[in-house]
Amino acid sequence: MDTVSVLLMGFISIMIVNNLVFSKFLGICPYLGVSGRIDMAFGMGCAVTFVVTLSGTLTWIIDYCILQQFDLEVMRYVCFILVIAGTVQLVEMYVRKFFPAMYDSFGIFLPLITTNCAILGLCLFINLWGVDNLPEAVVLSIGAGLGFTLAICIMAGIRENLALADVPTCLKGAPITLITAGILTLAFMGFAGMIR
């Protein structure tokens, strides 16, 4: 396969087939916590996409060019978390300055992107999958972020419609949200046999 085909297949795979939320169950806290409204979900998805893209790219560069070259793989987690925390600080300052209403509505979830396991998970998966070139690391990072945005926006759209649905009293709130998340996961698992 040529390079473009490999990058395209990797992008589709991590965005839809191996979506970090639906297949690895990573990033569930903001997925369930911020998916009440579509505008907030899209804003959170954009923030996570920026952070995961920058973090995945920078951590691959640091790991491949520094840590592996000097046999410092033991520092991998520390370096990855520092890069993620720094990137989240950039996003937080930007959103606070230019979108104060969105910053207030995110509440605690914006700084909690630092502890979003989907971001650290992607950085570790890039290493685990043996990605050995920068374009592939960048494409996988962008695809993971867009996959998270897709997942959270779909969930937000469904939850907005659930507010108008006749849901039994015992299932209102968290129970119907978790049932919906499970059905969405099953639906996305159907894509697993398509790319081989």
Image: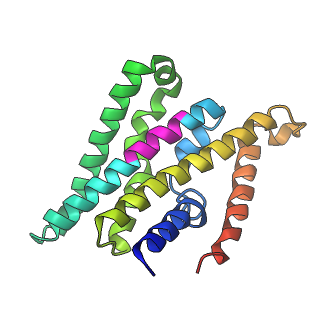
User: Compared to 16, does 153 lie above or below?
Assistant: above
Give the image location of residue 99, x and y in percent.
Answer: 45, 21
How are the residues colored? rainbow
Question: Compared with residue 66, is residue 154 higher up or lower down, i.e. above or below?
Answer: above
**Total numbered labels placed on residues in the image:** 0
From the viewer's side, name the closer residue of 126 and 171. 126
Q: Residue at x 37, y 43 (%)?
A: 114
Q: Residue at x 80, y 38 (%)?
A: 162
Q: Is residue 50 magenta?
A: yes
Q: Is residue 145 magenta?
A: no
- Of helix, strand and loop, which mostly describes the magenta segment? helix
Percent across and percent down for residue 146 are 52, 50
Residue 119 in percent (x, y) is at 41, 52
Does 166 sit above or below residue 22?
above
66 on left or right of 11:
left
**Res. 121 visible in picture:** no
Residue 101 in view (yes/no): yes
**Along the viewing direction, whichever of 169 and 161 lies nearer the viewer:** 161
Left-right relation of 111 to 31: left
- Examine the image and state in which quarter residue 175 appears: top right
For this orientation, the residue located farthest to the left is: 70
- Residue range highlighted in magenta: 43-51
Task: Tell me what residue is drawn at x 28 percent, y 50 percent.
Answer: 81
Assign the C terminus to one quadrant of the image: bottom right
- Nearer to the camera, 171 or 180: 180
Quadrant for the N terminus in the image: bottom left
The residue shown at (37%, 30%) is 92
